[in-house]
Amino acid sequence: MFPPHTPVGRIGEKALLRRIRSRIKGARGVLVGIGDDAAAVETGAVSLITTDSLVEGIHFRRGFGPDALIGRKALSVNLSDIDAMGGAARYATVSLCLPSEALLAFVDGLYDGLLERARETGVQIVGGNLSRTPDAIVVDVALLGQADTLVRRSGARPGQVALVTGSLGAAGMGVRLMEEGVGRDGARVEDERERRCIAAQLDPAPPVGFGLAAARAGLAHAAIDVSDGLSGDLLNVCQESGVAAWLDAGALPIDDAVKSLAQERGGDALDLALHGGEDYQLLLAAPPEAVPGLRDLAARSKVALTAIGGFQEGEPALRLRTGAGDAALVPRSHEHFGSG
Amino acid sequence: MFPPHTPVGRIGEKALLRRIRSRIKGARGVLVGIGDDAAAVETGAVSLITTDSLVEGIHFRRGFGPDALIGRKALSVNLSDIDAMGGAARYATVSLCLPSEALLAFVDGLYDGLLERARETGVQIVGGNLSRTPDAIVVDVALLGQADTLVRRSGARPGQVALVTGSLGAAGMGVRLMEEGVGRDGARVEDERERRCIAAQLDPAPPVGFGLAAARAGLAHAAIDVSDGLSGDLLNVCQESGVAAWLDAGALPIDDAVKSLAQERGGDALDLALHGGEDYQLLLAAPPEAVPGLRDLAARSKVALTAIGGFQEGEPALRLRTGAGDAALVPRSHEHFGSG
């Protein structure tokens, strides 16, 4: 009916809503989906709710990758939060602010990614909102989940081990590459390592389900998703738990592509792993006796899990142990309102 | 610690989050509030969820009224949706996108209004998100509620009566006045009628609780909140219900201030009541035998309720009955991506 290069301003809100609605089927647990004043969904005794937004010019740029990846990421960053609480994500609403010159193709692509990621993770998109904005696109997802066993940031205790899933630093390296123009405007990226880092940035893959499994097995005493950067997020666990923590620099699972690119280009791989942000991995605190069980669970879930340090008595602060000794580690987290 | 005229870019996200968090107390039903990966709340078997955003330059302008009213409205527009489903609002998340030059005073004012409106309506603010934006402020609220009896847009049947709460047209007149500069930059508005219309626009007062009461009493068969405009929202009920509807122009509860100002200034009060939008009143469909019960309920709730037309067999379409006869009524709803 409308060609993909039609600006949404020419389509109008109602027709755009109808188009989105036609792509979303009712599903288990959804009593009322898109198209009423509110969605109605079946919930349990305890629900989790989180919200996170992607803003054009801050978190993404149009044309830097397929639009579908913006949709995938908008859901993934929220999935990561629900999993880090030990919950299972179930229902999402999508609030989309669009300038009138945004193209229908963008909205279609965004929903391709949202719906694909939702299918992968058993999430139902149940509602949302469309609004005009004078300038930057904003995609705001609210995600509703359920949990039997909550895992807080505040559960870390002295003597517990700090563990992290996956690898660190690739998303941070990806931003750096993209800022230098690698892969801009859909240009093909030949270097496999660069492709990996840019993919980590554009299409993060939190270990969805691992936080839930660890919570149900009673193996994780605290958890946080690594979104701001390992250092800042670990310090946050310390602040919420009232403990100090140390990291073993040699143990950090720095992404191989990051190590190799940093060596070649002169960057600091350890710095990216500590402060890069947007890894969307899971940082856990567990007593030593729970570590073997967590390792089994990780192996069964095909999730890499690495012990990277520990918690101890003390004021909330971090120390980094390297071959050269032990020194205070000051987080340089991603700060949304900072100069960065 | 920070003077109110500090730009948020100088405060940083973490400090701003701490400031917001310090204002929000834990409350009934909230197991985990702000400060973890997600909020955890007690819910019933059926939850309602809705989301709506206010965008600077589209839905509000800084400095046009107290910032607190932006916070109040961000919650009110969502409260209206939950009530129109027959639900009770319980928990809200607030996703706030701010340019770095936005002032701390704005955030404080916004939260003054959000928290005040939340207290008035028994809602707990349980989480949210702060993000930088290059330009326009976006306030996106997701609101979670519960319901025993759902009232859909699809329940209208031929022979039923259309009723609306409150009065119509004031918010639309308010926009018009503001566009003409009335009350700009906090200028005092001397005319009581103008004040009333601007207040209706800046601080809408949906009849929260009336939709819930009507649902529980089994008196409303369909409901929608009048946000886009009476004509567009009534047509939407027709489309969802597969019926036609007519309106009696003489019966519409056009706001007295709108009638008086339109007469004086040469505007069309009926037009504003039909198409103006943002009234945030409740439009109901009820069988004739339920109308006395609804009137009793309205009287007890101190809500004005007016029968304005009815539903009949036919393709989804509207007719307007006036002294001059009966004619097709084509909605001219607020369209977010249109030229308006």
Image (cartoon, coloured by chain):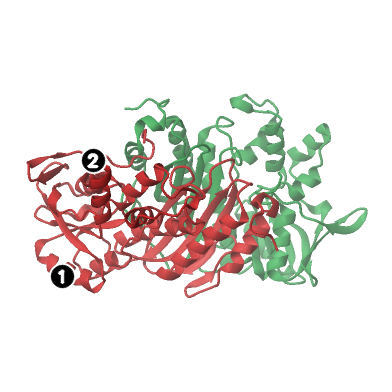
Chain colours: A green, B red
Q: Nearer the viewer, residue B135 or B82?
A: B135
Look at the picture and state if B153 lies above or below A214: above
Coordinates of residue A40 in the picture (x, y in percent): 34, 58
Amino acid marked by disc 2: Pro
Specify the quadrant of the image occupied by residue A320.
bottom right
Q: Earlier in the sequence, mark 2 or mark 1?
A: 1
- The residue where tag 2 is placed is B331
Specify the quadrant of the image occupied by residue A150.
bottom right
Q: Which mark is residue B247?
A: none
* Separation (CA) of disc 2 from disc 1: 30 Å
Amino acid marked by disc 1: Gly
Q: Nearer the viewer, residue A293 or B269?
A: B269
Coordinates of residue A12 in the picture (x, y in percent): 35, 35
Contact check, label 2 and label 1, Cβ < 8 Å: no
Look at the picture and state if B138 lies above or below A246: above
Coordinates of residue A272 in the picture (x, y in percent): 76, 45
Coordinates of residue A162 in the picture (x, y in percent): 73, 62
Quadrant (top left/top right/bottom left/bottom right) for the N terminus of chain A: top left
- The residue lying at 92 percent from left, 57 percent from top is A325
Q: In the structure shown, which secondary structural element does the residue marked by tag 1 occupy?
A: helix
- The residue where tag 1 is placed is B293
